[in-house]
Image: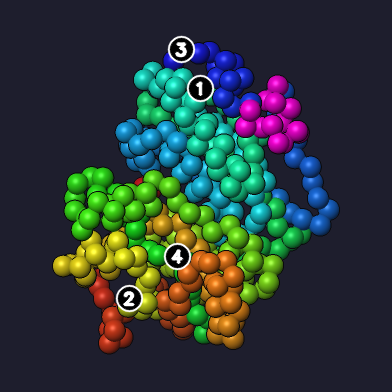
């Protein structure tokens, strides 16, 4: 690194606070967060480690955007409006100031898209892998948010976007599969590197009282819906034929559809919103999907029973060896 810690802050990070005056340009030991009487603050944090959550060869801009967006996805799953974030980076010796400049450009891009701003953080050196810890702040109406454990028997299970693209992108980067075309390969790798947090959807689901149960798909579709099922003392039944797949994903697995559906159901890193809602909300959900231009698919139902089942077109259970990612 050819710049000092304070040079990095002044040159690259302080400008990211320009639209958040209570950060004081990172000149103080901490920032302020103005409280609103009618709203509650939502706080979430994710840590991304080189070699586990991203590759050292990934573009710095993409790493920055993924670091912010996985946190924004957590806020979306709570129905929260983004506000600001703090950032802690542990650099190793091969990280250059040019890399940091590119990284902060990625953050600047997404700050404009999602309306949130850097308000503080820390920079340190490490002999280990590059590590990025980001804490994101949002807000919801006072004492109101979407929960993981409030599913009701008979609820439909819905998911936004398409599932499995990120997992396929990771396999492409690891040379474990081949895409049907260069366009498909680029699309799937982009989905792995740059998630699409459904902020507007999460806010609308909460504010319009469409549902009370939601989470984002990070560890895998089956693993994450099982959090809802277990926490609600119910069984989740997922219809494999209803899981929304992109054209790029379908083309990539056209000769191995069973392998594809297993990957989509268990791969993770989709960062789509998974939620449950009463069947009488279907028309509102369809209207919301059209209004936001976000595909939303009904993929299952909550019933009496335990655990989560993946079912084929004949309503028979599909055996699943591994339901999703486990950190330990």
* Label of residue 240 in the image: 2
Q: Residue at x 55, y 19 (%)?
A: 8
Q: CA distance from mark 4 to mark 1?
A: 37 Å
Query: Which circle's residue, 4 or 3, is located before the other in the chain?
Result: 3
Estimate how packed mark 3 is, as few (under 14), some (14 to 19) or many (20 or more) residues with alpha carbons within 10 Å.
few
Q: Nearer the viewer, mark 1 or mark 3?
A: 3
Please report the bounds of the magenta region as a residue range: 15-27
Query: Does the magenta portion include 166?
Result: no
Q: Residue at x 29, y 62 (%)?
A: 249
Estimate how packed mark 4 is, as few (under 14), some (14 to 19) or many (20 or more) residues with alpha carbons within 10 Å.
many
Rendered location of residue 161, percent (x, y): 45, 65
Q: Nearer the viewer, mark 1 or mark 2?
A: 2
Query: Does the magenta portion include 16?
Result: yes
Q: Nearer the viewer, mark 4 or mark 1?
A: 4
In the picture shown, does residue 146 fall above or below 183? Answer: below
Estimate how packed mark 1 is, as few (under 14), some (14 to 19) or many (20 or more) residues with alpha carbons within 10 Å.
few
User: In the rendered view, does 153 fall on the left or right side of 314?
Assistant: right
Residue tagged 1 = 124
Q: Residue at x 74, y 60 (%)?
A: 141
Rendered location of residue 216, percent (x, y): 49, 60
Query: Which circle's residue, 2 or 4, is located before the other in the chain?
Result: 4
């Amino acid at each position: 690194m050819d710049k000092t810690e304070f040079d990095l802050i002044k040159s690259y990070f302080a400008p990211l606070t320009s639209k958040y005056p209570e950060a004081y340009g990172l000149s103080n030991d901490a920032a302020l967060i103005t409280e609103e009487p009618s709203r509650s603050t939502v706080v979430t944090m994710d840590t991304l480690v080189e070699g586990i959550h991203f590759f050292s060869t990934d573009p710095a801009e993409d790493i920055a955007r993924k670091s912010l967006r996985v946190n924004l996805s957590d806020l979306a799953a709570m129905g929260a409006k983004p506000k600001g974030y703090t950032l802690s980076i542990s650099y190793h010796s091969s990280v250059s100031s040019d890399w940091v400049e590119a990284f902060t450009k990625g953050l600047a891009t997404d700050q404009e898209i999602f309306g949130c701003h850097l308000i503080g953080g820390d920079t340190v050196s490490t002999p280990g892998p590059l590590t990025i810890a980001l804490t994101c702040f949002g807000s919801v109406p006072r004492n109101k948010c979407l929960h993981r454990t409030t599913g009701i028997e008979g609820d439909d299970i819905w998911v936004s976007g398409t599932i499995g693209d990120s997992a396929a992108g990771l396999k492409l980067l690891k040379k474990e599969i081949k895409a049907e075309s260069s366009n498909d390969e680029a699309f799937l790798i982009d989905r792995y590197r740059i998630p699409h947090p459904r902020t507007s959807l999460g806010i609308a689901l909460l504010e319009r009282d469409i549902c009370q149960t939601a989470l984002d798909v990070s560890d895998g579709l089956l693993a994450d819906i099982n959090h809802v099922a277990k926490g609600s003392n119910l069984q989740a039944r997922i219809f494999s034929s209803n899981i929304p797949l992109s054209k790029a994903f379908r083309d990539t697995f056209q000769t191995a559809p069973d392998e594809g559906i297993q990957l989509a159901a268990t791969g993770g890193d989709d960062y789509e919103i998974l939620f449950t809602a009463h069947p009488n909300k279907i028309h509102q959900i369809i209207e919301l999907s059209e209004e936001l231009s976000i595909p939303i698919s009904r993929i299952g139902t909550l019933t009496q029973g335990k655990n989560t089942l993946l079912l084929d077109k004949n309503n028979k259970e599909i055996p699943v060896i591994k339901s999703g990612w486990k950190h330990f």
